[in-house]
Amino acid sequence: MKTAIVVVAFNRPNSLIKLLSSLEKAFYPSTDIPLIISIDYQNSAKHEDVVKIANDFIWKNGDKRVIEHKQNLGLRKHILSCGDLTEEFDSVIIIEDDLTLAPDFYTFANGAAEFYKDEDKVAGISLYSYEFEELGWFRFYPKRNQGDTFFMQWAGSWGQLWTKNNWQSFKNWYNKDIDILKINIPDHVKGWDRSWKKFYIAYLVETNRYYVYPYYSFSTVNDEQGTHYSENSRTNNVCLMRDNASSRFRYTEFLNCTTKYDSFFQPIAKEVFIENLNKVVEVEFDLFGTKKVKNFKSCYVFSIKPSKNTIMSFGNTLIPFDDNLFHNVEGDFFNLALKTDFSEFNSVLDKGKKLYYTRKVFAIKEMVIVILYRVLSKLKFVK
């Protein structure tokens, strides 16, 4: 496949230098790999620095093209314009300028594009692998399978590949009159401004498609502020994949893979035998409490939320957390109940207990709640 590398640049000369340096050090299968540096416009000295850095960069692995936009597009339109380059190439690897890449990022991405090119359920390939999910900054533990990839209804934005078919299908959907508010995706995502990503996530859910994700990351985020982040990154920096020019990746087939996650970073609903019901039922997951009750679709839900009529309760000793259901781990951390029996309300102390035993990055308010719970538990006021 003819896969082009597309760098998305805007007003961050130091970041662009870091990214181009990691591109220069990467492994490539040939010297016929196009590099396109697309620069959004801003009337500033930094913009001129970015243009000069892009023009001066020597690309030894194929043709280089610099696109200087003459007016400011904003991030969403800029990304969409880069995706449209699939009209010219079989696939494009989109890389924003605040990333650093693993040396074999191209080997992984191009191989994945070839492997999944005929799989209609695959709508994109991520270079990035999450250590924390984006809805509540809980630690994310995707279930391991025998391959190097799994699937999720979440669009990666820290390095991704789109094939021509991926992009054409999305654009056909995007150009319709779509009401995102009616699609079952997180409210948090619906509220994003200037975001192309919320539309792609909605597209994945609406059309029942998935992104391919690696278990080890081929990109990481640098500590520099950007359009959607006013502070330096604390949770988006991840370990890069090992350096190995001869890597042979085991791409997981979509059809038989059970390692799939929805747009809430939750395992997709599964058929499970429930001892207290003495039957197999479809169980939906809400392991972090980031799904609202209105988002539940299955009749039975396994959740951290409180319920008024709990069918069974489970502990939280196994990782990933859904294993506590599959292995019948006793405890009072997770509840299995009908979706109509769950409540959004959680007492402060119960919330403190649940937060304390989860693996996440705490917001200040959450820290206060956890400290209150710990103090009271030490004083034997709560268990």
Image: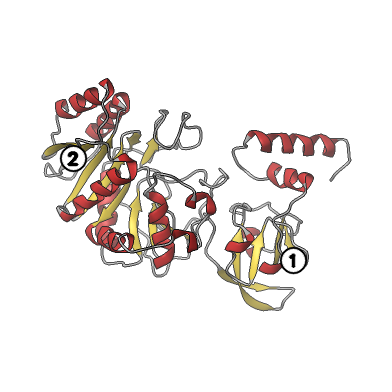
Q: Position of residue 281 (x, y in %)?
A: 62, 75
Tell me the amino acid under the disc marked 2. Ile
Tell me the amino acid under the disc marked 1. Met
Residue 139 visible in the picture: yes
**Left or right: 88 in relation to 26:** left
| Identity of the residue drawn at 77% across and 67% down | 309
Q: For the residue labelled by badge 1, is the local secondary structure a helix, a strand or a loop?
A: strand
Q: Nearer the viewer, residue 187 or 119?
A: 187
Quarter occupied by residue 219:
top left
**Left or right: 199 in relation to 188:** left
Residue 148 visible in the picture: no
**Left or right: 63 in relation to 313:** left
Q: Position of residue 310 (x, y in %)?
A: 76, 66
Q: Position of residue 165 (x, y in %)?
A: 24, 62
| Identity of the residue drawn at 48% across and 29% down | 231
Mark 1, residues whose alpha carbon is within 10 Å: few (<14), some, or many (≥20)? some
Q: Earlier in the sequence, mark 2 or mark 1?
A: 2
Q: Nearer the viewer, residue 75 or 9?
A: 75
Residue hosting label 2: 36
- Of tags 2 and 1, which is closer to the observer? 2
**Vertical comparison of 257 with 369: above or below:** below
| Identity of the residue drawn at 31% across and 66% down | 119
Q: For the residue labelled by badge 2, is the local secondary structure a helix, a strand or a loop?
A: strand
Quarter occupied by residue 35:
top left
Q: What quarter of the picture does the N terminus occupy?
A: bottom left
**How far apart are the alpha carbons under marks 2 and 1?**
55 Å
| Identity of the residue drawn at 43% across and 44% down | 193
Mark 2, residues whose alpha carbon is within 10 Å: few (<14), some, or many (≥20)? many
Pick out the residue farthest to the right: 380
Pick out the residue farthest to the top: 45
Residue hosting label 1: 312
Q: Nearer the viewer, residue 54 or 313?
A: 54
